[in-house]
Image (spheres, rainbow, N blue to C red):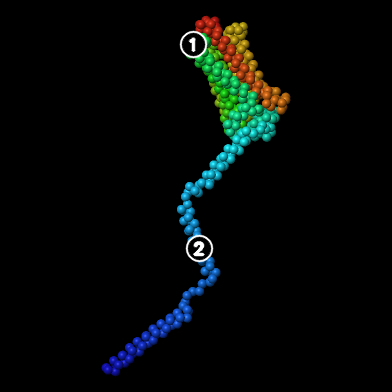
Amino acid sequence: MDSSSSLCDQADESHTAEMEQTATDHSGSLLNQKGDNKLNVPQLDGEAVASQYVATKRNDDEEQEEEEEADVDPVRVLTLPLQAHHAMEKMEEFVFKVWEGRWRVIPHDVLPDWLKDNDFLLHGHRPPMPSFRACFRSIFRLHTETGNIWTHLIGFFFFLILGIGYMFSPNINFVAPVQEKVVFGMFFLGAVLCLCFSWLFHTVYCHSEKVSRTFSKLDYSGIALLIMGSFVPWLYYSFYCSPQPRLIYLVIICVLGITAIVVSQWDRFATPQYRAVRAGVFLGLGLSGLVPTLHFMIAEGFIKATTVGQMGWLFLMAICYILGVALYAARIPERFFPGKCDIWFHSHQIFHVLVVAGAVVHLHGVSQLQAFRSSLGGGCTADTML
């Protein structure tokens, strides 16, 4: 029993001594490694360390720049672009003013297709001018449209002033003032609109293709309005005592006139290739008056129709219109003298003059009819249409 206990104690002491020796050896090993700088620290390559440093520095710089940008006042950022924009606008305005005052007429062969209308007018054309101010200022310059503009601009003011005078003049003895003023008003309205649309078109048609197309439609519509308006007072007084045929003819001419306006809205209607078609449409609209004219002459007789009925003035008006349309369609005289009628006396100018002359002649004729009706006091007999 005592020997067994002794053996166990010896074994425990031996085990404890071994553990202490192991711990001592391990501690010494660590101390030796520390003293010799031989710890298991991984060794880094120099290039790798430099690359890592550069990358870190770059990231730090980028973060700093982002913080600085976040702190910048947005007004300061926009200042330079806004100043540049305003400077650009002033520069464009300056250049445009210089161009506007110094543009020169150009020959026909360098015009864009949408400005080419009459190839017998060789020189003196306005270039495309995308400015309404420049277009209206060109009224006072010499070019192929100068005569076209001024003939109808003067005619516009003439009929506008004359129409106002007719409407408010106390010296005109109307039998039925309201009806007759409406009748004359239709004529003056048609004349004023026709001449106004015409001079506006010839003024701005060099602005752009879109503007040219739009105002050409107004121009053609104005021609139809003038023809319709001219028929109204003549039919009113010529068939004063025959209201039924008068109403029929008025309806027919209005339908034909509206049809002409609708047709003139077709884009191709304004092209040079359809010049003859345009002339035919408006000539046909005007010649539709032959039916009531023949009716009137057969009913009243040639002598009475040409004297009391003022048919002579109506014939003269028709000659003005037909001659003007014929010259316009055939482009005479510039066809025979190309380059010689570029500014003055080409067919379109002559046509404009004849349109104004025809309207003046027509006004004189219907004024004579009105005076005759006033002299009769508004009465009707069974044997006359007047």
Residue wearing tag 1: 176
380 shown above or below 127: above
Horizontal and vertical percent for residue 164? Answer: 53, 17
Residue 63, visible in the rendered structure: yes
Q: Position of residue 304 (x, y in %)?
A: 60, 6
In the rendered image of this protein, does residue 358 appear above or below residue 26?
A: above
Instruction: Provide the secondary structure element on which disc 2 rests.
Output: helix
Q: Quadrant of residue 223?
A: top right
* Tally of numbered tags: 2
Name the quadrant of the N terminus: bottom left
**Earlier sequence position, callout 1 versus callout 2:** 2
Residue at 56% x, 21% y: name it.
Answer: 192
Near-viewer residue (288 or 159): 159
| Cα separation between marks 1 and 2 | 101 Å
The residue under the point 58% across, 26% down is 200
Q: Nearer the viewer, residue 125 or 327?
A: 125
Report the residue at 53% width, 46% height from top. Answer: 81
| Residue carrying label 2 | 57
- Residue kind at label 1, given as amino acid type: Ala
